[in-house]
Amino acid sequence: MKFLLTVSLLLLSLTTALAAEPLPSAAEIQRLGERMYRDGLLPSGAVMKAFVSDDVPVDGTAFTCVSCHLRSGLGSIEGEVVTPPTNGRILYQERKPYVQGAIHVPLIHNYAVYLPERPAYTDQTLAALISAGIDPTGRSVLKAMPRYELDDRDMAIMIAYLKALSDQPSPGVGEHVIRFATVIVAGTDPVAVESMLLPLQFSVDRKNRLAAAAGANPRVARMGYNMLGDLQSYTFTLARWTLTGPPEGWRAQLDDYYRKEPVFALLGGISPGDWEPVHRFCEENRIPDLFPVVDYPVISDSDWYTLYFSRGIRQEGEAAARYLHGMADLIKDRAIVQVIRDTRRGRALADGFRAGWQATGHTPAIDVLLPAAEALTGERLQQIVAGHKPAVLLVWDDAASLPAIGALAGQPDRPGLVLASGNWFGQALWTVPEPLRELVYFTWPWRLPQEDARFDISVNKIFAGKSPAAYDPRIVRQSYTTGEVLGKALMEMRGEYHRDFLYDTIGMMTDMYYPLYERVSFGPGQRYAAKGCFIVQLGKGEKPQLERRSEWVMQ
Amino acid sequence: MIIPLVRALLLSAAATLLLAAAAGAAEPARYQRTIERYTIPDVVLINQDGEKVRFKTLFDTQQPVVVDFIYGTCTTICPILSAGYANLQRKLGTDTTRVHLVSITIDPENDTPAILKKYLAQYSAKPGWDFLTGSRKDIDRVMNAFDAYFRDKMDHKPLTFIRSPKDGSWIRLYGLLSGVDFLDEYKKAGLQ
């Protein structure tokens, strides 16, 4: 009762406050509306005032429209709380406990039945909802949705913005086709390129076979429709955009490809080194790129449009820091030394460790830089150890460093632990001699091989008679995951093929268990799916297995 | 453009609501409330400053403690729960440490201390509000101890727990509470 009285008084006060004002241009509405919707800032730059759970005041920057309705405005589901769409195209239609035209599609129908019926909104009822939390049936939504204090002009801008939000299908989506592309940087190992392409093309072909079968057979069409709605009748295309020359010239090539064939999203992509120009292209054009196969992703906590498998090589160094943080009581004030091969990979590992180690408040490690072409000898490594007497020695180098590390084994002042990159050691990791296996630990950014074998049956389907030996098994598994995540996301998009909704949908996915990575996890705005890295040692015996010494994710 | 109609509609809606209020329209229960006893697991978690926290010791106190389960990139439930915490701290005035507010992540996979710290800053959290992360195993143990296990963060439920310093019992609140409800419950626990 108290709540109703409060709302009523608010409504009465609003009726005297409103007055008409001219609206800015469409472009300005888009800019200002987006700022209110996403950042909680009024056109004046002031913070929007909001009240949640009836009466708790919060700054709009802490609790904005995008918090629940997400970027696309097409809503979210979390636990038992379903947030309905807030884009004009849907708000201004009557809502029934089904979606017209998709009554027999469980994926869509099951969503619709959660939401209460209501008449179509009008500008007036929408203004009442935003400012007082009352929907057109008179029902209060204040239990979950804030009410916002907006003046007339700001309210009009907000409503105009909502009307344009996810109003038209994204570029690359046609009546019966969704276009994708993948980016290949010339000079990438051809085996790696083919390993990235094979699973993607398999996913696209599989989807298109369903569409073709549906076109030819009404029973298949009905079955496909019941499973996938309109998605079953779409065909997918996958263009290959090859970038040549230095990275500075890639942007013009990307623009040219995109101008000729706008795509809904980029799938995968591969580069032996740089990726940043492609990342920037996606940011500026708001084009999703799902899972490029790169070692050096762009690290950002705010960029939106590229979803990476992980933080790349750097993540191994970060994991090493977290692992050693867990044993800080044993290390005490003794030194940690990083021997860093002066290459991009060596520096990325060292940077990751440095950032992680210092973030936990420890004394910085001592860095020893090895020139790119200089061999690491046993003598050199012993000099380093003798000079600093480290508790832990990090060797960010390839497997050629193994003999030098081996020379430490019998030394009385050797470090208690040597840590190297299992990724960088590659197959040579399995050749670590037995006496050394107790001393050397490795970062291992994947599921343990003996445990990943259970996915072989699923992955091997994509080879379709081709020899798996002709492909890079890790890249195949990565790209397989890209196809699976894309397929799952598209099925859950309820026929709303908008780029922002693709990421909104992926952000609502539960943790997933695919080949290669121990676990991939998502969440709104999370852009590095595999967040962990094991620390392992090589076990004993002639056919040793890796043995984990840490959890997948350490804090 | 929309203004005259808005005014008419708001007047109409206000009149309807006033009538409903005057008639004493019954509101459905907004949340469930039970009294529980929990056995706190002896695990070490990590706070927003990267410091190790022996979880059990947080409750060796005569100070009121409130616990909830949230995560850093949550979109729907957590902002409401956290707005409630922020509001309580506002009501506490200058001595915000009189009540220990504890948020525990259900997304330890992503929530590093840096993310926890950023999240608290977003809600202008003051001393007395800690946000904890830890290993997935330890977080699972804590969730289980509070009968609040979520298989996945996307299965999240709005739960708040208020511990009475008098007898160590817990008020378990299940639902999205308004600020008034939260403060009422806080007082019912005998806390001022």
Image (spheres, rainbow, N blue to C red):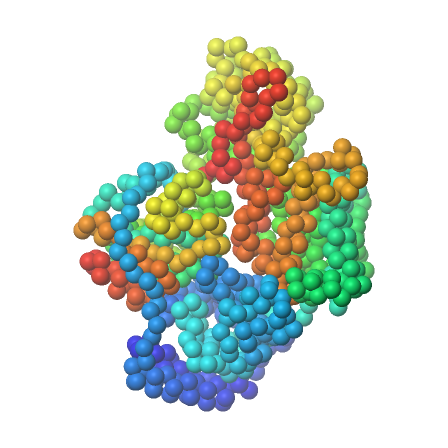
Residue at image x 46%, y 45%? B108
Q: Is residue B89 left or right of residue A112?
A: left
* Quadrant in which residue B89 is drawn: bottom left
**Is residue A292 visible in this depiction of the protein?**
no
Whole-percent x and y of residue A118? 51, 78
Tell how many labels. Answer: 0
| Left or right: B125 as drawn, with respect to A387 | left
Residue at 54%, 48% in the rendered image: A511
Q: Quadrant of the N terminus of chain A?
A: bottom left
In the image: residue A310, left or right of residue B122: right
Q: Please, which residue is most extreme toward the left here?
A: B166
Residue at screen point 23% across, 51% down: B169
Q: Is residue A390 left or right of residue A484?
A: left
A448 versus B109 height, above or below: above
Estimate the x, y position of residue A131 in percent, counting from the top left.
44, 76
Looking at the image, which residue sits at the far front?
A: A219
Using the image as rendered, state which of residue B117 and residue A25 is in the foreground.
B117
Q: Residue at x 42, y 53 (%)?
A: B70
Residue A546 vs residue A294, the one in the foreground: A546
Q: Is residue B136 above or below residue A98?
A: above
The C terminus of chain A lies in quadrant: top left
